[in-house]
Image (cartoon, rainbow, N blue to C red):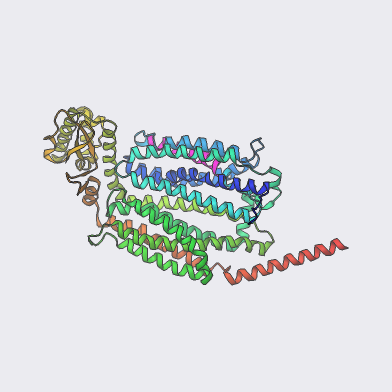
Amino acid sequence: MKEKKVLSLDEKQFRKNKWFFSAGGIGRDMLYTLVSTYFLQYVQFGLTLTVAQFATLSILIGILGRIWDGINDPMMGAIIDGTHLKMGKFRPWIMIGAILTALLTVLLFNVRPSGWSYIFVICAIYLVWEASFTMNDIGYWSMIPSLSRTKERRDSITTYVTFFAGLGTIIMTGLVTFFSPGNVLTAYAVYSVVACVAILICQMMVVFTVKEAPRDEVEAHEENNVSFKKMVKTIFHNKQLLWMCLALLFSSTATAILLGLIYNLYYLEGSYNGDIFIFLIIYAIANTVIQLMYPRIAKKFTRKQIQFVCFFIQAAGYIGLGLMGWFNTGIPLIIPLCAFALLVFAGNTLFYVAELVNLNNCVEYNEFLTGRREEAVVTTMRPLIVKFADAVKYLVVTVTLIVSGLYAITQNISTIETQKNVFEKRYETAQTARDYVTEYKALKALEANGATVEELNETMANGNYETLNKCQVNPEYLDAIGYMYIVRVDDKGKYLDSVQLKDDTALVFVVDGYDYQLLITVSDASNSEIHNAADEIYDAKRTFGTRLVIRISCCVVPCLLMFGSMWVQRKKFIVDEEYYDKMMADIETKKEHHEEEASTETNE
């Protein structure tokens, strides 16, 4: 009979800590993904802002927000380091940060003053959000050394944390991509509440179930302590780490830009719907499967060989994405999107894992140079580089949307999303529907006779346009509203028939005894054909320049950045497999020599 393994109290506590601490990352990354990845998309498709307002918001949040990060990250690290509370060093800040971040996230997606007031209010909320998330973020990640005082345990718990964080990202991305199109304002309001609840549950689980080691035990290990001075000194004395930071910045920026623009490319060329959720599945599967394959591949090929092949696999995928939509093949665009995206993500995953191995090898290189490993410094560099990459992404995405004219197009989509949201809150009576249609037709007639947007705004303010004013109609986007469908609804909430608002027959079925809604997407009587107002707007307003610029930013720029990352690692990074083995042999020889010297001194 096989003898049952008996775990020590220390091993039991570590296993408990590992599972509860790691699982606590699900809610954190659900919330972080919603804000860091999709807040710009929420603004683009859900709100009506001028180009200047959109650019200001993007710069303040995406670029100055990262500068603010650079200030409050070390400040928060120093505050945590000086914390002496009964709850411990990390858990108080994990709890406070989670509560504040949860509440502020709800505000970010539900506070909507108009115009410049929105910019100032949301930027203020966002900066406080950044500080509160930093409380939680620094406390959470800094807690790892107190839970794992050996390399094996630290590698184990870091792997689990990475897995559960990725799971949180996938969950939120799935929600956003599947349910948002045609339902932006309501969907994001719900997502913010879901993210709020998720982070509170997950992080309270960490606070009340995970036990951190006593402060003196953690601080007894010098490699667990990271200061800004120590970080700068290590980086600039370790040139290989410096080159790897540059390579990681290139590759992280490439991935961030692709993910930041791929939705716009698909909506422009494909359809404004939730089918891009399939793209997410491909992304998740590729990352998971390829990561599992890496150890076997690494046994047969060097990291430089892997990255060389992976770059060309990615390049083929980027070329395919760039050509997608130019030719009418009759195949739904989601199919080539997923096929080419699979090439990009498969190549990128293997490339990135090899890159992380190179980055981690900088620990041994530092030990080879100085005799100190400085593991915590190298660990801290990865999230820092990711934040820099995120700032560059914001800049590239903002410039692309404005220069290509795509932002102006998506403001039309935002307008119809707003109109849908107004009607979604309550079924409108036949009289309200008639008033809406009549006022819309009157305003369109004035526009056809040469009235400017300013004149139309004045007319709405002074004339009999009560219903349009109530629905916050912007005269600049009257054409977009005309693509929407007014739908008759029976007493059971079933859609009976629909017609586009710009159609002269729109008044025919606005009769008493029914409720009405404005929708973006409708089906015909047999449900065999779907009509999408947003798709019609994209088709009517896109230009060759729009299509070209989005492809340059979404496909060409990331491909060039990946080439830069590969070039740096092939030409400047010297710690390949052969060099690593020689380096480790030298480190081992030095250790044996020191042990012999210590033994001799003891005997004497």
Residue at horizontal 46%, vertical 69%? 308
Q: Quadrant of the C terminus?
A: bottom right
Residue at horizontal 22%, vertical 38%? 453
Position of residue 246 measured from the top left corner of the image (x, y, whole percent):
51, 60
Q: Residue furthest right?
A: 604
The answer to which quarter of the image holds residue 49 is top left
> Does the segment drawn in magenta span residue 135?
yes
Which residue is more in the foreground, 547 or 402? 547
Q: Which residues are the magenta region?
A: 117-137
Position of residue 8 measured from the top left corner of the image (x, y, whole percent):
68, 49
Position of residue 447 measured from the top left corner of the image (x, y, whole percent):
16, 39
Q: Is residue 545 above or below residue 585?
A: above
Whether residue 349 appears in this view of the structure is: yes
State whether the magenta stretch is mostly helix, strand or loop: helix
Q: Residue furthest front?
A: 1
Q: Quadrant of the N terminus?
A: bottom right
Residue at horizontal 29%, vertical 60%? 324
Q: Is residue 326 above or below residue 586?
A: above
> Does the segment drawn in magenta span residue 224?
no
363 lies left or right of 250 = right
604 lies left or right of 593 = right
The answer to which quarter of the image holds residue 245 is bottom right
Whether residue 400 appears in this view of the structure is: no
Residue at horizontal 76%, vertical 67%? 593
The answer to which quarter of the image holds residue 511 is top left
Q: Is residue 217 above or below residue 472?
A: below
510 lies left or right of 584 = left
For the image, the number of numbered tags is: 0
Position of residue 63 measured from the top left corner of the image (x, y, whole percent):
45, 47
